[in-house]
Image (tube, rainbow, N blue to C red):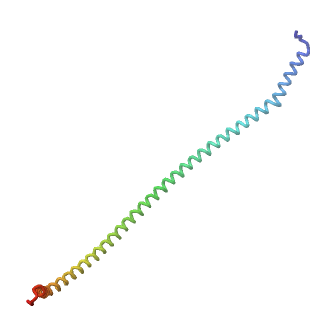
Amino acid sequence: MITTDITLFIQIVNMIVLMFLLNGVLYKPIRRILKERSGKLQGMQEEISKFEKNAKLRQEEVDAKMAQASGKAKAALDTARAGAQVAGDEKLAAIKAEADAVKEGKLAELKAEIGTARTSLQADLSGFATEMASKILGRSI
């Protein structure tokens, strides 16, 4: 059986002293270190979220600027294409007009040659007809 003598009270006092010593030497410093570590982690988490927010905002700004630059580039390209189309159409019209003028000149020249050939052939036609008739008939007409 358990007897209650002085050793029981010494053990109780020993346990109480040990609790205070362990609390002061071991538990409080560990709790303080854990609180500091938790505070640092919380601060780092806040900084990380702030950096992520800033990165997201900057990415949105970059995307907006890229979209704006793309729009400007597309507008400039469309303007250049339209200018090139107008210049091409003007050159094509000028070349077509020049080709038509050359064609008309050649046609007029050809008609003139046909007319001179026709008049020269018409003039020789009566002599040629009598000569052929005389050859066919074998006598002169």
In the displayed structure image, the side of residue 23 where residue 7 appears, left or right: right
In the displayed structure image, the side of residue 66 where residue 140 appears, left or right: left
Q: Position of residue 62 (x, y in %)?
A: 54, 52
Seen as rendered, the residue at the extreme bottom is 140
- Quadrant in the picture for the N terminus: top right
Seen as rendered, the residue at the extreme left is 141
Depth check, front residue: 87 or 76 = 87
Q: Position of residue 83 (x, y in %)?
A: 39, 65
Which residue is at a point 57% across and 46% down the rendered structure image?
56
Q: Position of residue 21 (x, y in %)?
A: 84, 27
- Quadrant in the picture for the C terminus: bottom left
Depth check, front residue: 120 or 60 = 120
In the displayed structure image, the side of residue 14 where residue 87 appears, left or right: left
Residue 115: quadrant of the picture: bottom left
Which residue is at a point 22% across and 82% down the rendered structure image?
113
Seen as rendered, the residue at the extreme right is 6
Q: On screen, 72 above or below 116?
A: above
Q: On screen, 27 above or below 91?
A: above
Q: On screen, 34 above or below 68?
A: above
Q: On screen, 128 above or below 74?
A: below
Q: Position of residue 86 (x, y in %)?
A: 36, 66
